[in-house]
Image (cartoon, rainbow, N blue to C red):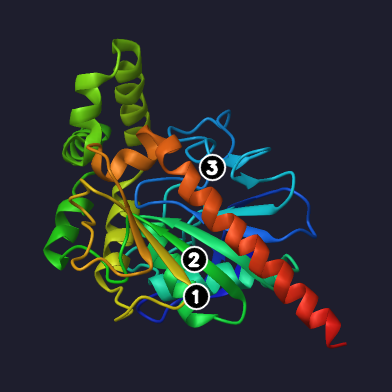
Amino acid sequence: MLIDDFRLADGTVVPLTLAYTRSGPRRAPTCLILHGYTGSHHALDPQIPVSDAGWAKAWAGPGKAVDTDACQVITVNLPGSAYGSEWPGAPHTYASVSAMAWAIDSLACRLGISRIAGVIGYSFGGYVAMQLKTDYPQRIGRVLALCTAWQGRGHTDELDRLKSLDTLTKREAFRKAVLLRSGLGVYAERADEPAVRREYAQLKAWAGEFSAQALWRLRAAAIGFDLGQCPADTQLLYASSDTLFPEPEPLPSNASVITTDLGHQSLLYEPMLWAPYIDQWWNTVIGQSRSNYSESHSET
């Protein structure tokens, strides 16, 4: 979808092409799913020819915890990422997390969705999910924030290094190093050889899909992100061994921790550990959505 008046971090106004997917019945409650820093919005369909296709298929789809037979699911490629959400020109600037939330809200309005019942955001996607709740509390119901925080990670001295990852080999080495620290090392020790080969093949494919520009733009957005506090109606879910987003101490009452040794990648490597929590959260969202619908119609 084309959004004509998208404002970048330096104030430049550009036309933004916003890539998204839409599944499920149009008049049903809507769930928005947002991907991580190096991920794509192709969360449900494993047949799409991208490296992480179907990353949420264990818990989102027909008959799953987020059931596309009974609800509408929207996924969005975050502006500045490498899978279709882009703008012409302005190569030296980026989109803030707040601008990303604005674009998604604009998309929902254009699609005729007056309220998004629930938003699931993984890692960087959690930033945008919580920004949406903060900026549009009347149009966003509940948020499930997975392996994330309400303040972004990173430092400005990282940006030049990310800009220098201008070859497939450099990006593959960068991604491999990050993943080995975030769960891939443990996964490779315990998984069978075909599974490990698939992971490394996907890593290589990712290096051919992603770009240095996408890496530094999203990192710059993360560096500037800080809500100050967790927004209302947000459930936090952490992985116990996640070194990127460790669980806070003391643990807030709106947070839970999944015990795993696969760190930040646990959601992707062992999604069935996460599915019951997502199922419980979505059932709560649906219950609240139906209650709000009944109350609004009883008043008319």
- Residue 99 position, x and y percent, is 46, 74
Q: Which residue is mark 2?
A: 143
Q: Up-down: is 227 above or below 149?
A: below
In-front residue for pair 6/63: 63
Residue 228 vs 32, above or below: the answer is below
Separation of residues labelled 2 and 3 (CA atoms): 20 Å
Residue, disc 3: 42
Residue 115 in the image, given as x and y percentages of width and height: 67, 72
The crowding category of the residue bearing disc 1, from other C-alpha atoms within 10 Å (few below 14, some 14 to 19, many at least 20), is many
Seen in the image, is 271 located left or right of residue 179? Answer: right
Q: Quadrant of the C terminus?
A: bottom right
Which of the two labelled residues, at mark 3 and mark 1, occupies the earlier sequence position? 3
Q: Which residue is mark 1?
A: 133
Q: Residue at x 50, y 41 (%)?
A: 56
Rendered image quadrant of residue 140: bottom right
Q: Residue at the left extreme?
A: 157
Q: Report the mark closest to the observer, 1 or 2.
A: 2
Mark-to-mark CA distance, 3 and 1: 23 Å
Amino acid type at circle 1 is: Lys
Q: Position of residue 251 (x, y in %)?
A: 25, 66
In the displayed structure, would residue 124 be above or below residue 68? Answer: below
Q: Nearer the viewer, residue 221 or 186?
A: 186
